[in-house]
Amino acid sequence: MATPGAHVGDAHRLSEVAAALAAPTRAAMACLLLAGTAHTGRELARHVGVAPSTASEHLAHLLDAGLLAVEVQGRHRYYRLADAEVAALLERMLTALPEPPSVAELPGPRLPAGMAFARSCYDHLAGRLGVALHDRLVELDAIRVGPDATTLTEGGVAVLADMGVTAARERTRPLVRPCLDWSQRRHHLAGTVGARLLTTLLERRWLLRNTTRPRELRLSRTGRDGLRAHLGIEVS
Amino acid sequence: MATPGAHVGDAHRLSEVAAALAAPTRAAMACLLLAGTAHTGRELARHVGVAPSTASEHLAHLLDAGLLAVEVQGRHRYYRLADAEVAALLERMLTALPEPPSVAELPGPRLPAGMAFARSCYDHLAGRLGVALHDRLVELDAIRVGPDATTLTEGGVAVLADMGVTAARERTRPLVRPCLDWSQRRHHLAGTVGARLLTTLLERRWLLRNTTRPRELRLSRTGRDGLRAHLGIEVS
DNA sequence: GCGACGGTTCGGCCCGCGCCGAACGACCAC
DNA sequence: GTGGTCGTTCGGCGCGGGCCGAACCGTCGC
């Protein structure tokens, strides 16, 4: 797929709705309306503790942002959330939630194509292939990325052993460790397991070193087939 | 269930994250990071068109709000979104979405208990029962609430006919019309169908008029059973 | 060591906006 | 009509924050 990469124009709308909720007074009003009920401006003013005139301005702001709808009935104006979507959005902002994003490019320092695809980073694998491998292992729940540590699961041990990769725990460094890839700007796999993985792939001749640039790596046909068979990875 | 009703304290956190995204510059930065890649402050500064010092302050703000994470590598500091949850939240704010909220009380003008439960509003049913009926019909896709009009579906015609409610289209008013309930602050069902529904429920003696306050209505035992059988409504 | 460079902090400017009270307009009741 | 209520608009005040350039700190490379 073409990298979507969130066009900058989107940011305008984002800041618009965010700004509408940025003032604590407006946020409090929105929370009150989150109950799904409609209220007059005066009521909301009383409950958030501001003058009716102030509340009126805030409500106009929320209205402009498309978060509220108003229903006139005689001399009363009943404000409510615009629709269920904004209600769901508010509830979401009050908590937090799942689903990871997709990869994209952006400028980033230029790099020879072969190096960008795969290269060794000290003792482990980097480049697009390294990142893809890392992501796939996360998908397979072979490794779990925590807030400040990445761990190898029992299933992960099996998956890797299946590929001929075994690693004993060492005192000096962790089994698995995320390493920020400076060309991809995403994590690839380092640590003892990351190192053993690279050496194994080289031993099996799934990966071949470039003769002139030793850090650059090339994926052999058997390597391509092996990755597809063992991990279900389709390399680009 | 007890009415949750979004405590006001929640509004603080809401405004905090909203304020973090309220500045267009910060929103643009967040959109760039939405790609899932990590970037240095200088890069982001260049892309959003501000001085590095300004970008640094913005990034610190986003960091404080918990939306970003930073990874130091040598003299570089790579910023990325804190986790997949904030990425999903951002994507959500850039679009919109479903799921209706729940009912709650708040102050509202006081009202005799019986009137609050069910009463006639001109020629149709109002009060908690009227709102519950309206909501249930929406759930059953018997009526559909649009941005500026509510319509009766074919399935809705069948459901209502099953209860003995039939209504011919008139020139003067729509078949179904939402009417804002001033005790519940939510919509109940008016229009020709709403009127026919009330008269039918009274004819069948599912609803009984209070002798002293004629607008007040009481649900009979057969009415309670009938609503459960026909619409799956459990009245409180 | 020294310079170069990425990054943050500091001081200062100025626009924006949250807040109020007062004035104005619309609607209802009498 | 008059008065009362709900609501918005306007003028004005003061704080907050976005922006920059300059100074400062850490790391890398020589």
Image (cartoon, coloured by chain):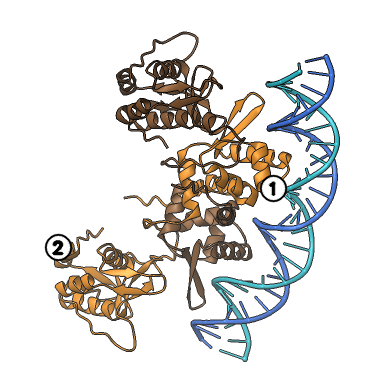
Chain colours: A brown, B orange, C blue, D cyan
Which residue appears farthest toward the top when viewing the image? A171
Same-chain status of marks 2 and 1:
yes
Nearest the eye: B15 or C4: C4
Image quadrant where one finds the C terminus of chain B: bottom left
Position of B192 with respect to B37 (left or right) is left
Position of B213 with respect to B22 (left or right) is left
| Mark 2 Cα shell of 10 Å, populated few (<14), some (14-19), many (≥20) | few
Q: Which residue is mark 1?
A: B49
Q: Position of residue A22 (x, y in %)?
A: 59, 51
Q: Mark 2 to mark 1: distance in Å?
A: 64 Å
Residue D28, image quadrant = top right
Look at the image and tell me whether residue B30 can be seen.
Answer: yes
| Mark 1 Cα shell of 10 Å, populated few (<14), some (14-19), many (≥20) | few
Which residue appears farthest toward the front when viewing the image? A211
Q: Position of residue A106 (x, y in %)?
A: 57, 42
Nearest the eye: B216 or A12: A12
Q: Position of residue A114 (x, y in %)?
A: 52, 30
Residue occupying the point 53% across, 53% down: A28
**Label of residue A156 in the image:** none
Q: Tell me the kind of residue under disc 2.
A: Ala
Secondary structure of residue under mark 2? helix
Is B228 located above or below residue A108 in the figure? below
Q: Chain of mark 1?
A: B
Q: Position of residue B87 (x, y in %)?
A: 48, 43
Is A172 located above or below residue A236 in the figure? above
Position of B227 with respect to B47 (left or right) is left
Is B194 located above or below residue A201 in the figure? below
Q: Tell me the kind of residue under disc 1.
A: Gly
| Number of on-image labels | 2
Residue occupying the point 39% across, 16% down: A200
Mark 2–mark 1 contact, CB under 8 Å? Answer: no
**Label of residue B229 in the image:** 2
